[in-house]
Each structure stands twice: as C-alpha cells, then as structure tokens.
C-alpha cells in the first residue's frame, strides 16, 4: 500500500486511490485551507491558499528530497513516498500573504453580510491571517448585481475562486456564468441575455466560500448563527437527496445539500431547495374534525351536516369506532409517508378490518426525469417513498397495486369506508376522481391542504410536512435513509406517526427506530434497515445480492 | 466544601474587651452616626417631583434609543449583533433591503422589550455603527406590557427627545463611523 507522510505522520492510502494533497492531509487530520478547490469540480489552483511544501522519500535509501518552491496542494497528486508539510513557517507566511491580498479589495462589511458566521474568508483570516493590516482600511458597501431569479452577486465581496463558473459549466452544463475583465479588475457576470436560471442555480450559493453569491430566498432573513441544522432528506422527488434543514424556533429558513456520495453528492435542485415554503402556508389544515350529521331543523326534516373539532386523544378512539362501524375498509398509503408510518398504518387498518384493502396512495408525476452533465438527476416522480411503501404493502400481501386500482375498487362499491393519506404539498386530485369516493359511509382524508377529496371527507385530519416527520424513506434507487424530525408541526397537529402509534395502543412517545427494527426483523427485503443507520443511508439490495 | 476541608482556616471568636462588655461606648458611637446624618446634606430626593442628578450620562444605562444619521434615517444596518449579544433576548429585528443606494439593509422593524431588558448595555457595546445607545432616561413606566415593547418609531423618538441633551457618544468615545 502506498504510504504518504503528512507532517511526519505516515498514513496508508488505497493502492488505486487518486488523492491530492488536501485529501491526503485530511486523512491525517490536517486541514489545508483552500478556496477554489472543490471535490466535485475541476482543479484550477488559482486561489493559492493551499500552497504547501512537498517532497519525495526515496524508497531505497529513505532520503527525503524536498521541492524548493511551494506547490498548490489541490493540484499535486500523492503517490508512495510523497512528503507533505502543512505547518512550516514558509507555508504559514504564504497563507498570511494570500489572506492579506484578498482583503485589500474586500469591503469588510461582515456585519451586514449574510455569509458572516459561515464564511471561509473570515475563518481562514482568523486562523491563518495576520492581526495587523498594512493596507488602508476603507469599509464600503459592495456593488450588487442580479444574476437571475434566485441569486444575487455582491461583486466586491468576490475573491474570484470561480467555483460558481465551473459549476455552471461542469455540473449544470448551462454555462451562464463567466469572468469578465482581467487581473485586479476581474468580476463574475452572466452572459448578456442569459441570466442564471437553471434548475441547479442555488448550488452556486453553497459553493461560494465568501458572501459574494446570495440566495434571494434567504437574503436578510436570518443570521446564520441563529440557525440549527438537522440532517434530513428532501421530499421533493424520488431522488431523495440528503439535506440539512436549517431552522430556528420551529420555522425553516433554508435547506442546504448534505454530502452523500450514494445519492446527491454535493448538490440539490432548486425545486427541492425552495420546496419548503408550503410548511408555513397559512392555509394548512391544522385541526382534526368530523362531519357530524345532526338533525338541526326537525320541522321540515332536512339535516345540515355540522363540523365538530375533535381532540387528538379522542381521534384515536372515535376514528377506530367509526371505521369499525362502517364495514369494509380501503386504505391508501401515501408515498409521502415514511416506511415506519406506512407499516403502522397498515397494522392499524388490519386491526380495524382484518380484510382491509391496502393500496399505494396517489403518486404525483410531473414531466420526465431531468439529467445534468454532472451526474445529477431530478426525478419526474414527485414523492420520496414510493418504493418504500410498496415494500411495506408487499409485507401485508398487497403488492402490485396502484392508486388507480384503489379508485376502481371504491367506485365498484367493494368498500364501505376509505382512509386516504396524503401529505402532498400541492393540488393532486380532481373533482371527478374525488366523486368516486362520494358514496362511502366513512371517508377519512389526512392531508396538508384542502382538496376536492377533503371537502367530501367525513373525517378531516391534518398531515405533517417533510421536515416534521421522522422515519425512513427509500428512494428510486432502493437507497434507504433515516432521518429525525427537524421542526415541530404547527400547534394542534399530530404527525401521522404519532397518531398511528397511539392507535396501535403503544405506550410513550412515537419511536421510529423501534418500529424500523421491527420492520427489518420481519422482512427479508427490508432487512438492511436493522441496526444503526449510517448518515448516508443504506442500499436495500445489499442483502439480496449476498 | 466540607467543614474539614484543609483550605478552611478556623478562627476562634475574639473574647469581648471591657468597652464592648460595657455596651455604652458602642451605643454612643451609634447615636453619633445618627446625629451626623441628621445635619449632613440629604442624598435622597423626592422623586418624581424632584429629579435625581445622573452622575455621568455617557455611561448611564437607561432607556434605549436608535440614532439617526445626518440625513435623519435610522442609523441601524440590521446586522443583528445587538440581538446576538443580548443576554435577555429582548431585541427582535426584521431586516430587509434598504431603499437607499449607500446602504444594503436596514431594519424593517426593530423592537425592544423594555420589561425583559436588564439594561446591561451589551447591545450598545456590540453595535458596529453606534446606532443603538442607552440614554440617561431612568423613569420608564407604562400601563401595559404591550406599551413597554418599544418599536422602531418609539426608539427613534427617544433619540429626537434626547439628542440635544445627550449628543451621540460616537464622537466623544471613539466610534467607528
């Protein structure tokens, strides 16, 4: 195995691994500062922050010969016997000079810059810069330039790392961004008439190591040090990208991609990134209610259905009683549910009616899969867990069905009651389809927003949004990821998991991990879910291949 | 710390001397203190008819104000550093893009809950543009809790009220802008 010496510490790397000095040093626990290098982009070695000393140890004699000049660590591959020095006085002096040069033209408007607190220029200056400034200090306001519908450029804060330019050329393949002028006058700009409006545009903001590129959606909303982050999974499409939900006081402020080599690498699409606003929509359904048919005016015999609000603790018992009284039950298991919730829902349904007819809920599909040159795909299937619920339904002997089968089943009067779970962020059902459910004795609809189906429902139950759930989703490539709840749902809303947990008569708080262990133990197809789930998830086919 | 801790030195109480046992000298001493204060100038005032004098208004920590710049606009740049420094979490700011070309953002709303505030002065110290200051106004009263939540307009009016008596501290105290 090749051996690399980092600051005197010998580390082994894989025989066919192609690492640069930054990656090799990271294995030894040494962080080489860098701006322009990013593992997902091509190497330009232009920022000069990662300059280090390197050398080569002679395999036969053990003698080390150093390269006389500093070399960029991002551009220097390591091989057997490579010597890396990251802490020498020469290296430190070089870093301080780079920092000094970058700050000469920087506005130093950190108090009003949204990046402050997560800015590499701040962090590296604190760590590697010098305390004294030799150039004149002229704090000023950065010029603002509109890049497109989602991104604003603060021209003077830019340090010209060109990560954003390379991203649009290599990953999104749209190449809207460019560098204008030369030397000290270099600036980022868009080509005239071609604003930055591709579906991955938000990623350039994450890539920007300083506060030059600002996300219009997040600009001025919150200082980053107030935000808490929870490792989550995007529910926007069946790709299931790993994300961080960044929130404060039960309000989501932004979503950021979470590095996951198996799923989304370093990126997420704009649909997902800005797809959290429905969580805080004021038109969400917030209380559980039941349409009670009461004779209001006895004189002429007409009855007016009144809606009564039901306490959650009563929902647990009354819903069960109503469904039991109604007769044959049909249940739609929404692909927005986690597999834990889906599994418990099936168990609840079968405990109410042992012959309950289970089927997947509506699967929203929009357009076609969209692929980008950087090996990133936005899926047409706009739900995160179709594969997961199908696996769960197969456990209950209800595999191979679809939402249309359920509609046909109800329309053919094979059911007396239906329980439709939703959780869709947008409109999903038309009036004609909803009418198929009109003749049922009981119709339970659990969804985020009002819909034609919701208006017919005898039981209206609120649902939880993606950041308010806990559990496991299985994406289109059979990759399962577990996550916990990021924010609490609005007051008065029980997430589905809590309701099903209580309807099953389980004690204490809803614990998705115990449910997951139970599912893993009862199914060969889902056996990979047993034990501790890694942050990047597991491939469900691992056990089937072996 | 336990009573037998070696760090503790135990001292015996000193036995009373003759004058202490007689009691009378100490009694006279006490009476003398009372008599001295009877004839010396008073330090208390009949508040609120009479106003107490504030020693140094520059370092007094009373009601907050939001300073205006030369053009009469709010000086605050909505950087949230006061809200970050505040140990009582009494400052609530909503930032938005400023309507002026020379400024990037400004507070759309700026509220201080004066009931929650502990008047520590950390906000004044954290402010990078000397926009928030504590005045020497010390009698802060209101009839409801809502009334004691000062919004931007009210904080600016405190500035208008006090700017002549107490000029902005930045010039005399080495401010940044």
Image (cartoon, coloured by chain):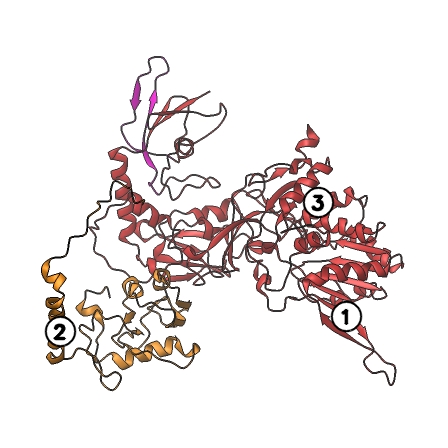
Q: Which mark is residue A387?
A: 3
Say which colour chain A has.
Answer: red
Of all chains, the one bearing label 1 is: A
> Percent position (x, y) of residue A295?
83, 78
Looking at the image, is mark 2 or mark 3 nearer the viewer? 2
Q: Which mark is residue A71?
A: none
> Percent position (x, y) of residue A524?
73, 35
Q: Quadrant of residue B92?
A: bottom left
Q: Residue furthest top?
A: A60
Q: Nearer the viewer, residue A72 or A295?
A: A295
Q: Is residue A383 above or below residue B132?
A: above
Q: Which residues are magenta?
A: A47-73
Q: Residues within 10 Å of mark 1 (few under 14, many from 20)?
A: some
Of all chains, the one bearing label 3 is: A
Q: Is residue A332 left or right of residue A171?
A: right
The residue depicted at 41 percent of the width and 82 percent of the height is: B143
Q: Which residue is under mark 2?
A: B31
Does the image show residue A478? no
The residue depicted at 43 percent of the width and 63 percent of the height is: A220
Q: Is residue B42 above or below residue A223?
A: below
Q: Which residue is under mark 1?
A: A291
Q: Nearer the viewer, residue A231 or B86?
A: B86
Q: Is residue B169 above or below residue A52?
A: below
Q: Secondary structure at mark 1?
A: strand
The residue depicted at 55 percent of the width and 43 percent of the height is: A374
Q: Cα distance, mark 2 to mark 3? A: 92 Å
Say which colour chain B has.
Answer: orange
Question: Sequence-wise, which precedes: disc 3 or disc 1?
Answer: 1
Q: Answer whether residue A456 is magenta in the image.
A: no
> Percent position (x, y) of residue A56?
34, 22
């Amino acid at each position: 195995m090749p051996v690399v010496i980092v600051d005197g510490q010998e580390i082994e790397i894989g025989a066919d691994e192609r690492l640069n000095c930054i990656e090799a040093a990271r294995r030894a626990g040494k962080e080489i500062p860098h701006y322009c290098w990013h593992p997902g982009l091509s190497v330009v070695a232009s920022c000069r922050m990662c300059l280090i000393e390197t050398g080569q140890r002679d395999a036969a004699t053990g003698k080390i010969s150093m390269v006389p000049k500093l070399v960029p660590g991002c551009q220097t591959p390591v091989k057997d016997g490579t010597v890396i020095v990251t802490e020498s006085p020469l290296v430190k002096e070089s870093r301080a000079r780079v920092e000094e040069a970058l700050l000469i033209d920087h506005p130093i408007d950190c108090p009003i810059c949204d990046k402050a607190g997560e800015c590499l220029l701040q962090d590296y200056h604190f760590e590697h810069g010098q305390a004294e400034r030799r150039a004149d200090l002229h704090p000023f306001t950065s010029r603002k330039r509109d890049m497109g519908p989602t991104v604003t450029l603060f021209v003077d804060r830019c340090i010209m790392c060109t990560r954003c330019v390379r991203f649009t050329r290599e990953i999104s393949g749209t190449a809207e961004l460019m560098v204008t002028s030369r030397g000290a006058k270099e600036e980022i700009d868009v080509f005239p008439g071609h604003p930055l409006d591709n579906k991955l545009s938000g990623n350039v903001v994450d890539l920007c190591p300083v506060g030059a590129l600002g996300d219009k959606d997040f600009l001025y909303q919150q200082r980053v040090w107030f935000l808490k982050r929870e490792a989550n999974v995007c529910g926007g499409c069946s790709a299931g990208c790993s994300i961080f939900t960044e929130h404060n006081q039960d309000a989501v402020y932004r979503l950021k991609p979470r590095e996951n080599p198996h799923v989304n690498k370093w990126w997420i699409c704009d649909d997902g990134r800005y797809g959290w606003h429905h969580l805080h929509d004021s038109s969400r359904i917030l209380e559980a209610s039941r349409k009670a048919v009461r004779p209001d005016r006895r004189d002429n015999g007409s009855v007016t259905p009144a809606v009564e609000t039901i306490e959650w603790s009563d929902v647990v018992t009354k819903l069960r009683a109503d469904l039991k009284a109604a007769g044959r039950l049909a249940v739609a298991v929404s692909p927005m549910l986690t597999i834990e919730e889906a599994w418990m829902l099936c168990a609840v349904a079968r405990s109410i009616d042992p012959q309950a007819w289970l089927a997947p809920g509506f699967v929203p599909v929009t357009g076609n899969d969209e692929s980008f040159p950087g090996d990133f795909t936005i899926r047409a299937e706009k739900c995160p867990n179709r594969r997961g619920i199908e696996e769960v339904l197969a456990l209950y002997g209800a595999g191979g069905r679809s939402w249309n089968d359920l509609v046909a089943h109800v329309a053919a009067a094979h059911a007396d009651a239906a329980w439709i779970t939703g959780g869709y962020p947008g409109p999903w059902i038309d009036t004609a389809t909803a009418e198929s459910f009109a003749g049922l004795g009981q119709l339970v609809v659990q969804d985020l927003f009002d819909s034609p189906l919701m208006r017919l429902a005898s039981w209206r139950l609120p649902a939880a949004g993606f950041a308010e759930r806990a559990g496991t989703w299985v994406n289109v490539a059979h990759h399962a990821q577990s996550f916990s709840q990021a924010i609490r749902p609005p007051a008065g809303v029980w997430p589905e998991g809590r309701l099903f947990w209580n309807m099953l008569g389980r004690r204490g708080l809803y614990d998705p991990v115990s449910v997951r262990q139970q599912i893993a133990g009862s199914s060969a197809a889902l056996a990979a879910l047993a034990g501790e789930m890694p942050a990047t998830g597991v491939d469900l086919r691992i056990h089937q291949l072996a | 710390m336990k009573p037998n801790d070696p760090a503790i030195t135990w001292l015996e109480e000193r036995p009373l001397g003759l004058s202490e046992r007689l009691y009378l000298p100490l009694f006279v001493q006490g009476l003398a203190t009372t008599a001295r204060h009877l004839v010396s100038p008073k330090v208390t005032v009949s508040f609120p008819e009479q106003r107490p004098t504030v020693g140094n208004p520059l370092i007094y920590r009373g009601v907050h104000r939001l300073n205006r710049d030369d053009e009469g606009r709010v000086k605050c740049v909505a950087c949230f550093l006061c809200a970050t420094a505040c140990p009582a979490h009494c400052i609530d700011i909503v930032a938005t893009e400023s309507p002026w070309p020379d400024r990037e953002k400004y507070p759309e709303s700026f509220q201080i809950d004066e009931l929650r505030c502990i008047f520590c002065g950390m906000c004044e110290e954290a402010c990078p543009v000397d926009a928030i200051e504590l005045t020497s106004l010390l009698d802060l009263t209101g009839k409801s809790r809502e009334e004691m939540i000062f919004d931007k307009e009210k904080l600016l009016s405190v500035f208008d009220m006090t700017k002549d008596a107490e000029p902005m501290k930045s010039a005399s105290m080495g401010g940044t802008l």
